[in-house]
Image: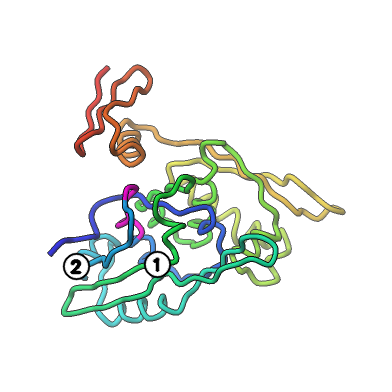
């Protein structure tokens, strides 16, 4: 039996998913992220993804029983994403169209309407699964992916109103002091501790002393050749040679070597 839960450590999401309105529990988010790593850059279509409970436990680093998995899968089948595409234009999509379990073997399928947002992407946020699993906060995971979408640019701005809508936060978080204490500062701390980027934010717009917009600044934080090698393998799987700082990086045939 093929194991679709490999040791791939990356996942991609289109900007529309990154900024979609949805809410997941930590266990639901864990499962979604793990299954997103099964999708490769060159995949043309979704398929039935098959894996054992033991393989999922290894991927997530936790022990599960079949009832826990059933409860999480059942809950996820009812969770939706709201993607706003412009004035009076939106989509409501499900994460999955199917979950099944048979004596330790699980099968799942992503909803086919997610294809434009997970397959053949030209623009996307590239998330590091291992780092994201270390974040305790789902807010940190969402902010991390927002920052990853813009890490090549180095910064982006977002209104407080939009941030509240994306995260579906309670009204009390419209107060910037609450948002800062409960969402922003803890997320920045986790991302900088466990992620491969360093981020910070600053107030960038006020109206009558009320903060209405913040700007995130992002810096890459790969301190070893091994970390760089992982990125190259994921970003350029079919390229024969990449030149980086006078080193030749060979990444064809699933292998990678360097000289210099």
Real-space CA distance between mark 1 and mark 2, rounded to the nearest whole angstrom: 27 Å
- The residue carrying pointer 2 sits among few (fewer than 14), some (14 to 19) or many (20 or more) residues within 10 Å by Cα, namely some
Q: Is residue 52 above or below residue 142?
A: below
- The residue carrying pointer 1 sits among few (fewer than 14), some (14 to 19) or many (20 or more) residues within 10 Å by Cα, namely some
Task: State the image coordinates of residue 38 (x, y, percent, origin top left).
Answer: 30, 57
Q: Is residue 2 above or below residue 75?
A: above
Q: Is residue 158 above or below residue 139?
A: above
Question: What is the span of residues highlighted in magenta in the rendered image?
Answer: 36-42
Query: Reading the chain from its start, which is encountered first: label 1 or label 2?
Result: 2
Task: State the image coordinates of residue 248 (x, y, percent, origin top left).
Answer: 29, 21
Nearer-the-camera pick, 203 or 12: 12
SS class, disc 2 = helix
* Display colour scheme: rainbow
- The answer to which quarter of the image holds residue 45 is bottom left
Q: Mostly what secondary structure, the magenta segment?
A: loop
Nearer-the-camera pick, 19 or 109: 109
Task: State the image coordinates of residue 28 (x, y, percent, origin top left).
Answer: 40, 70
Q: Which residue is mark 1?
A: 112
In the visual, does 74 lie left or right of 55?
right
Q: Residue at x 23, y 73 (%)?
A: 106
Q: Residue at x 34, y 22 (%)?
A: 243
SS class, disc 1 = helix
**Foreground disc of the pair 1, 2:** 1
In the visual, does 7 lie left or right of 14?
left
Q: Residue at x 39, y 54 (%)?
A: 119
Nearer-the-camera pick, 74 or 189: 74
Q: Residue at x 30, y 34 (%)?
A: 229
Q: Which residue is mark 2?
A: 54
Residue 15 belongs to the span the image colors magenta: no
Residue 40 belongs to the span the image colors magenta: yes
């Amino acid at each position: 039996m093929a194991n679709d839960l490999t040791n791939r450590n990356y996942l991609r999401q289109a900007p529309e998913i990154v900024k979609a309105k949805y809410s997941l529990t930590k266990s639901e988010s864990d499962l979604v992220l793990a299954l997103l790593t099964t999708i490769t850059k060159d995949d043309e279509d979704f398929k039935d993804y098959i894996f054992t409970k033991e393989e999922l436990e290894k991927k997530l680093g936790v022990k599960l029983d079949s009832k826990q998995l059933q409860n999480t899968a059942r809950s996820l089948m009812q969770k939706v994403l709201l993607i706003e595409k412009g004035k009076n234009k939106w989509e409501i999509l499900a994460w999955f169209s199917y979950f099944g379990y048979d004596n330790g073997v699980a099968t799942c399928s992503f909803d086919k309407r997610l294809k434009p947002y997970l397959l053949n992407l030209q623009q996307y946020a590239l998330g590091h699964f291992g780092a994201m699993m270390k974040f305790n906060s789902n807010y940190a995971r969402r902010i991390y992916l927002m920052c990853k979408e813009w890490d090549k640019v180095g910064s982006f701005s977002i209104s407080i109103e939009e941030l509240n809508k994306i995260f579906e936060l309670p009204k009390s978080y419209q107060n910037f002091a609450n948002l800062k204490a409960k969402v922003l500062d803890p997320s920045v701390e986790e991302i900088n501790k466990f992620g491969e980027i360093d981020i910070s934010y600053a107030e960038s717009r006020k109206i009558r002393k009320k903060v209405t917009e913040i700007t995130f600044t992002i810096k890459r934080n790969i301190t070893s050749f091994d970390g760089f090698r992982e990125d190259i393998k994921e970003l350029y799987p079919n390229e024969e040679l990449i030149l980086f700082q006078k080193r030749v990086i060979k990444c064809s045939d699933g292998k990678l070597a360097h000289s210099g």
